Image: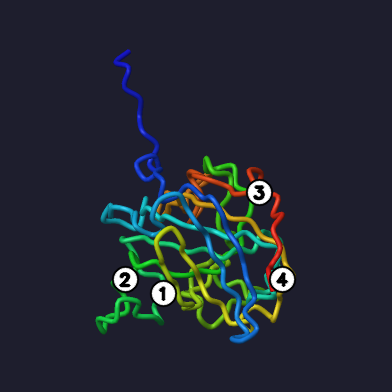
């Protein structure tokens, strides 16, 4: 035995920038919007993934707000799972084709800029983190996605909400009408490493999910119990 152990893909990003110490969701009546905020021990959003040069195995870092919202509140058809607001960065792909986050006139080169996604998460034993973005069969006419969704066969939207980084805090601002005017839901706060699976790795029997959670850095409640309420 050499005494050298293989490092999990997400280990190198496990630092104070993902040590969640506080979170809140606040309804701001003056703007009729909700502000989702996570605070960390380090500098929120400072650490971003290193590219691997491929969609298959592409790293994704995320600050996530699992909620008690329904999928229909955010423009999806009815489906079971955990509706979550995710703030992500990933250099190997751009999944926000409607938005030019770095304002350079190109719409396909800014995946590494922190941006917002609505997702529905479901339990998945194929990945160490135990969760993945819920998928459906491509072309399933029973599934409805928002017009801002990038078109992948999973419950995944790219709504284009503003992301603000300020020291230890990262925030996303969501107009109330974009979430069915819901203001009384519960939530939790999570930081994690996710990874894409593309091509043969995803298509074969027993394959990995398109986008799965591989390592959880922190859960504010400690047990994903979604105990926190929206402040008004």
Q: Position of residue 209 (x, y in %)?
A: 51, 52
Q: Quadrant of residue 60?
A: bottom left
* N-terminal label among 1 and 2: 1
- Camera-side mark, 1 or 3: 3
Residue under label 3, please give it. 224
Residue under label 4, please give it. 78
Rounded to the nearest angstrom, the CA distance separating label 1 from label 3 is 28 Å
Residue under label 2, please give it. 110
- Can you say whether 209 is above or below 173 in the image? above
- Examine the rendering and report whether any part of residue 133 can be seen: yes
- Examine the rendering and report whether any part of residue 137 can be seen: no
* N-terminal label among 3 and 4: 4
- Name the residue: 41% across, 70% down: 95
Rounded to the nearest angstrom, the CA distance separating label 4 from label 1 is 23 Å
- Camera-side mark, 2 or 4: 2
- Camera-side mark, 3 or 2: 3
Number of other residues with Cα within 10 Å of mark 1, as a class: few under 14, some 14 to 19, many 20 or more:
many
Quick one: 156 or 160, which is closer to the camera?
160
Number of other residues with Cα within 10 Å of mark 2, as a class: few under 14, some 14 to 19, many 20 or more:
many
């Amino acid at each position: 035995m050499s005494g050298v152990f293989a490092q999990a893909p997400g280990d190198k990003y496990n630092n104070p920038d993902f040590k969640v110490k506080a979170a809140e969701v606040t309804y701001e009546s003056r703007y009729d919007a909700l502000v989702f905020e996570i605070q960390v021990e380090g500098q929120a959003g400072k650490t971003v993934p290193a590219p691997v040069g491929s969609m298959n195995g592409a790293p994704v870092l995320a600050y996530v707000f699992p909620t008690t919202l329904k999928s229909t509140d955010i423009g999806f058809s009815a489906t079971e799972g955990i509706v979550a607001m995710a703030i992500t960065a990933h250099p190997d792909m751009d999944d926000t084709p409607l938005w030019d986050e770095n304002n350079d006139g190109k719409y396909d080169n800014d995946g590494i800029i922190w941006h917002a996604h609505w997702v529905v998460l479901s339990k998945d034993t194929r990945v160490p983190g135990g969760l993945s973005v819920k998928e459906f069969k491509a072309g399933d006419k029973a599934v409805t996605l928002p017009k801002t969704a990038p078109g992948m066969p999973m419950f995944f939207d790219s709504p284009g909400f503003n992301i603000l980084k300020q020291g230890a805090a990262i925030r996303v601002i969501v107009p109330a009408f974009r979430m069915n005017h819901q203001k009384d839901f519960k939530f939790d706060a999570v930081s994690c490493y996710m990874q894409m699976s593309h091509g043969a790795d995803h298509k074969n029997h027993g394959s990995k999910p398109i986008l799965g959670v591989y390592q959880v850095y922190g859960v504010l409640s400690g047990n994903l119990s979604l105990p926190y309420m929206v402040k008004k």
